[in-house]
Image: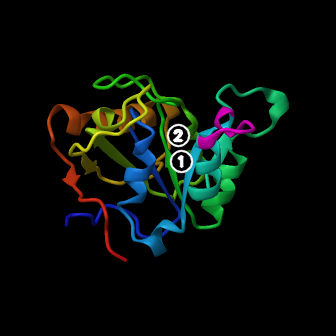
Amino acid sequence: MHDERLPRAGPAILVANHNSHWDTLALFALFSSAEAASLRSVAAQDYFRAGSLVGWIARRVLGAIAVHRAWRPAAGDPLAACSSALDSGEILILYPEGTRGTPGLMSEFKAGVAYLARRHPDVPVVPITLSGLDRVLPKGAVVPLPLTIRVDVGRPRCWAGGDCRDFMAELRAALLGPLETGVEALAVEPNRPG
């Protein structure tokens, strides 16, 4: 298995494209159960409304950190909980598109990942491209299909100064690369024993 680019301990930030609710579960499956204990997914606050099954799973099973999709100055620092998790040595899972997108297309990225990287310049940001999950459980579907998926892990990068837009463009190119060419990525098999 070629998984040396995956961080086995935090702090670290995993960024991935997002087309299915199963994306997070696929990323968790890349780690042993002991390693997965330090993973924290980041999810939109609206998933945590009362009675939401997805919110319950995100909070109780995946230890999700809730963030508001639309930041308001009165709400304070929208990334405070993410920064705190990184300070505690955890690994964050972020989807810079902000929501599940259209299969085969990548939406523009939100700048939150760049702001976190700038705050934590020594924390590696690892781009991960997920392929096939959009067919396993696409947006709007209820029943998953037993199809093959592929996970490509790109080269980790740290904040090296500069502009947040440039950092986001670099991450976006790293995620698009495996979808377009398959270059500079290592395929990783899920379900690591442990």
- Spatial distance from mark 1 to mark 2, Cα to Cα? 5 Å
Residue at the spot 66% in from the left edge and 38% down from the top edge: 52
Q: Which residue is denoted by mark 1 in the rendering? A: 117
Q: Secondary structure at mark 2?
A: helix
Amino acid on which disc 1 is placed? Ala
The answer to which of 56 and 122 lies nearer the viewer is 56
Quarter location, residue 194: bottom left
Q: Position of residue 42 (x, y in %)?
A: 58, 45
In the image: residue 180, left or right of residue 8? left
Binning the other alpha carbons within 10 Å of mark 2 as few (below 14), some (14 to 19) or many (20 upward) gives many
**Residue 3 sits above or below residue 25 on the image:** below
- Image label count: 2
Residue at the spot 68% in from the left edge and 36% down from the top edge: 45
Residue at the spot 64% in from the left edge and 59% down from the top edge: 85
Q: Which residue is denoted by mark 2 in the rendering? A: 114
Residue at the spot 69% in from the left edge and 57% down from the top edge: 84
Q: Is residue 157 visible?
A: no
**Residue 186 sits above or below residue 146 on the image:** below
Q: Secondary structure at mark 1?
A: helix
Quadrant showing the N terminus:
bottom left
Q: Position of residue 152 (x, y in %)?
A: 25, 49
In the image: residue 180, left or right of residue 27? left
> What numbered label is drawn on residue 100?
none
Binning the other alpha carbons within 10 Å of mark 1 as few (below 14), some (14 to 19) or many (20 upward) gives many
Q: Position of residue 22 (x, y in %)?
A: 41, 44
Tell me which segment is drawn in magenta.
Answer: 46-53
Amino acid on which disc 2 is placed? Ala
Q: Is residue 121 visible?
A: yes
Q: Position of residue 124 (x, y in %)?
A: 45, 57
Q: Is residue 85 magenta?
A: no
